[in-house]
Amino acid sequence: MKCPRLRSALLLLLVGLAARAQPVLIRAGRLVDPATGTAITGQQILVEGGVIRAVGANVTVPAGAQVVDLSDRTVLPGLMDAHTHLCLTMTTQGGKGLNELLQRLLASTLLETNARRALIGAKNARDMLESGFTTVRDVGNAGNYADTDLRRAVEEGIVPGPTILNAGRIIGPLGGQYHGIQPDRPDLGEPEYLYADTPDQMREAVRKNALFGAKVIKIVIDDQPYLYSVEDVKVLVAESARAGLRVAAHAATEAGVRIAAEGGVASIEHAYTASTEALQLMKKKGVYLVGTDFSRSAAEAMGMADYHQKVVERLKRARAVGVLIAYGTDIVFPAPGETRGTLSIGGIESFQEAGFTPAEILRSMTTSAAKLLGVDGQRGAIRPGLAADLVAVPGDPLADASVLRRVSFVMKGGTIVKR
Ligand SMILES: [Zn+2]
């Protein structure tokens, strides 16, 4: 074996496989099923080969099994975040407000190499995993496909991180999400975005993402004076479907939300100012709301303090309407004493303020998110045959979701990554 990189990658893989080969028996003081919002005490979970083999009060334990005693804790499926930007960390220095925010994003695009973006991604991925997020949908802003390399590095065991469904480059009309991009240099939004204005360009953009490793397609509908039309969205959704991919649509405004829902996307990101009627349309079309519902402190750090009340109020209406909801955070900034993981858990605060029950919050982070991501056949619950993605917390998350801030044990794919 001449290539040392290949050799070390294989070594890591072998070490991982060896660790996973030994069966693990977990004793759970309490075991939560988020789908039903119920818990049972005194359960055992047998994990073998990265997969949950058996769950019950008295599981037959194979010889040589490693026993993990979590009898003083509550065990639940690994958490999911349906809206991350792992390969992006923006400074909060400088002016506040949405335009300043976009200028800082432009600075990342222009000044940071793809290698740096991938390294930032590796750090954020590890932090997410340690806070209990075992699966994320990463919706772009990753330079020139740094997210694909990050996903593969995690899959190969080169760096620790959640299972990642990455979007590659975000598809949007001319200018991407850069307001007022200047006519001499319209290309400044690349490689962060793939501009697509005609149906042919849209198909080409989807194909490019599929070829370069995207597992979901992210489009921007309403971040320019010109919006994608319902017909445009249908072209993007159809081409994505041909590649086996679902579409996540950035739509912040009333018009954008309606276009996205009519166009048949899988999820609408943000929907900050969606009316109740627009939320009803989403429900009718089976479109998930990924609200990126900033907590008060996160909104302030982003220079968007007024967004917190807006999302809480919108969450209340979404709950009343009964829209499908998957948890998604959109955290892209650092904060003193926090990690990307702890900041991402912080989003539950908005749900609590909007009157969601702990079971509803948990469901949005597991069962519902797994369905939106299309991984519900493999993850999102603790039952035989699924990947052994699970976390443990002190206390009872069905009584108080705040205990999710204190994840003290994480297993991903049968490997213990925190205990
Ligand atoms: Zn975002």
Image (cartoon, rainbow, N blue to C red):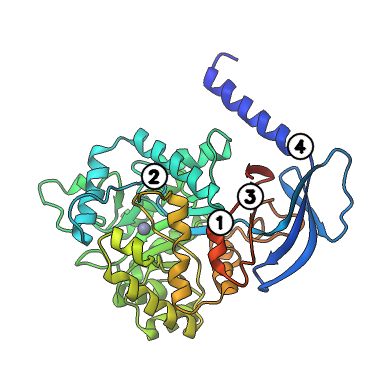
| Disc ID at residue 409 | 3
Secondary structure at badge 4 equals helix
Is label 1 in contact with label 4 (beta carbons under 8 Å)? Answer: no
Tell me the amino acid under the disc marked 3. Answer: Phe
- Helix, strand or loop at label 3? It is strand
**Amino acid under label 4?**
Ala
Query: Is the N terminus in the top left, top right, bottom left or bottom right quadrant?
Result: top right
Q: Identify the element where label 1 is drawn.
A: helix
Say above or below: 56 vs 184: below
Q: Nearer the viewer, mark 1 or mark 4?
A: 1
Residue on which the image places disc 1: 406
The Cα–Cα distance between marks 1 and 4, rounded to whole angstroms, is 29 Å
Q: Which residue is mark 2?
A: 87
Question: Residue at label 4?
Answer: 21
Of mark 4 and mark 3, the one earlier in the sequence is: 4
Location of residue 271 (image quadrant): bottom left
Horizontal side, residue 296 vs residue 61: left or right: left
Q: Amino acid type of disc 1?
A: Arg
Quarter containing ligand 1?
Answer: bottom left
Q: CA distance from mark 1 to mark 3?
A: 9 Å
Seen at 66% across and 55% down, the residue is: 378
Dots 1, 3 in contact, CB < 8 A: no
Q: Earlier in the sequence, mark 2 or mark 1?
A: 2
Mark 4 Cα-neighbour bin, 10 Å: few <14, some 14–19, many ≥20: some
